[in-house]
């Protein structure tokens, strides 16, 4: 585990469409204009979603369940770092830079996955953050997040 200003990228996932199957990857290429290669989010403030392990585990513990992080349907999964719950914060991961644009608000899909999950993800931005890519590049599991 790292300190609150540094973490580790421990998961990468994409979806071909909004309700598509989550595909886990070891590496991904990020583009400011088209998002993460293979993911349906390509433009705007919600190109990428990042989930933080401590927040995911807290939500699961509150419900007394052990669910895989991909249940959240986020793109990136980060361990060992506190959540940057301020818009405009930049996160450096591998060769790419992401700008936090807001909170990833839990939706009805979370409730369909597990009763109570939507509410468990709501406090303190537990559902993660939305980001846009400001500098593209290669990211891979094991990259430092700062």
Image: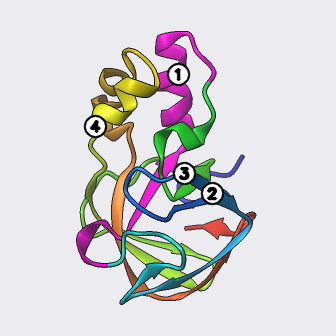
**Residue 103 in sight:** yes
Between the C-alphas of marks 4 and 1, the distance is: 16 Å
According to the image, label 4 marks what residue? Answer: 107
- Report the span colored magenta: 43-66
Q: Secondary structure at mark 4?
A: loop
Left or right? Give the position of 57 relative to 133. Answer: right
Answer few, some or many: residues within 10 Å of disc 3's Cα (few below 14, many 20 plus, some between 14 and 19): few
Please tell me the numbered disc located at residue 21: 3
**Residue 9 in sight:** no
Q: Which comes sooner in the sequence, label 2 or label 1? A: 2
Whether residue 55 is in magenta: the answer is yes
Q: Secondary structure at mark 2?
A: strand
Q: Are marks 4 and 2 in contact (CB under 8 Å)?
A: no
Nearer to us of marks 2 and 1 is: 2
Answer few, some or many: residues within 10 Å of disc 4's Cα (few below 14, many 20 plus, some between 14 and 19): some
According to the image, label 1 marks what residue? Answer: 60
Nearer to us of marks 4 and 1 is: 4
Q: Secondary structure at mark 3?
A: loop
Q: Nearer the viewer, residue 81 or 3?
A: 81
Q: Which comes sooner in the sequence, label 4 or label 1? A: 1
Rendered residue at 35%/71% (across/down): 47
Looking at the rendering, which quadrant does residue 69 occupy? top right
According to the image, label 2 marks what residue? Answer: 23
């Amino acid at each position: 585990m790292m300190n609150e200003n540094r973490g580790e990228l421990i998961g990468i996932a994409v979806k071909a469409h909004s309700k598509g199957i989550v595909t886990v990857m070891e590496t991904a290429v990020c583009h400011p204009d088209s998002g993460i290669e293979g993911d349906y989010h390509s433009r705007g403030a919600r190109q990428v979603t990042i989930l933080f392990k401590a927040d995911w585990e807290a939500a699961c513990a509150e419900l007394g369940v052990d669910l895989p992080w991909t249940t959240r349907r986020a793109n990136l999964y980060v361990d060992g770092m506190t959540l940057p719950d301020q818009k405009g914060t930049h996160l450096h991961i591998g060769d790419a830079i992401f700008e936090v644009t807001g909170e990833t608000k839990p939706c009805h899909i979370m409730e369909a996955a597990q009763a109570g999950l939507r509410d468990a993800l709501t406090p303190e931005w537990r559902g993660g953050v939305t980001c846009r890519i400001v500098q593209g590049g290669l990211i891979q599991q094991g990259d430092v997040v700062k």
